[in-house]
Amino acid sequence: MKTILTLIAALLISGYTFAQDFSKYENQPGISTVIINKNMFKLMSRLDLDSQDEEIQQYVDLINNMENIKIFKSNNKAMRDDLLADANTYVKNNNLDELMRIQEDGKKVSFMFKPGKTDDEILQLFMLVDSTDGNDETIVIIINGLIDLKQVSKLAKDLNVPGAGSLNQD
């Protein structure tokens, strides 16, 4: 009986670890959060846009496949440490693959992902921004949905995101 209870407890604890979604930070003092859900993406895709423009249609397609975007940011030392520790645990427990890393101007930026069905698709894009000296801010960005890496690459280039060219797998 003890073995069964221990097994159940272990499964519940491991299930909690894998289900970690950073929701504990949503109302936490010292953490700024932005949560964009599928309903917002639906509204954005219904905007009266020129559907003949191929570039705009690519953005609409990207938006239509997104489930949510979650952004967590803190300048508070204790909150930054917690956020960083949880981010590292999340990456490890969810077996996210590294897409790329950038270290520039005192910042470390890591892009991790959960693979999709094809090499051009991902199910989750996870970005972690941290300072190399520990004196700045920590940012976690999680994008969930069916994401086409080619579309993300184009969007990142249009927005002048450093390292955006590395996202293109062609």
Image (cartoon, rainbow, N blue to C red):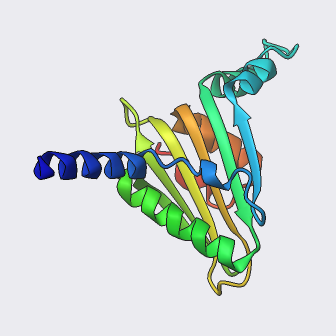
Please indicate, yes or no, whether residue 55 appears anywhere in the rendered image.
no
Instruction: Answer above or below: position of 82 versus 56.
Output: below
Task: Report the residue at 54% width, 55% height from top.
Answer: 166
Residue 143: give x, y in percent of width and height.
60, 42
Residue 134: give x, y in percent of width and height.
65, 84
Instruction: Answer above or below: position of 32 versus 8.
Output: below
Q: Residue furthest bottom?
A: 133
Residue 129: give x, y in percent of width and height.
63, 66
Name the one closer to the observer, 96 or 60: 96
> In this image, 125 relative to 162: left or right?
left
Q: Quadrant of residue 84?
A: bottom right
Name the one closer to the observer, 103 or 37: 37
Task: Report the residue at 42% width, 44% height from top.
Answer: 114
> In this image, 86 relative to 118: left or right?
right
Task: Report the residue at 14% width, 52% height from top.
Answer: 2
> In this image, 149 relative to 119: left or right?
right
Please indicate, yes or no, whether residue 58 appears anywhere in the rendered image.
yes
Q: Quadrant of residue 74?
A: bottom right
Residue 85: give x, y in percent of width and height.
51, 69
Name the one closer to the observer, 154 or 140: 140
> In this image, 128 relative to 98: left or right?
right
Instruction: Answer above or below: position of 113 versus 150.
Output: below
Q: How many marks?
A: 0
Instruction: Answer above or below: position of 51 versus 163.
Output: above
Q: Residue furthest right?
A: 48
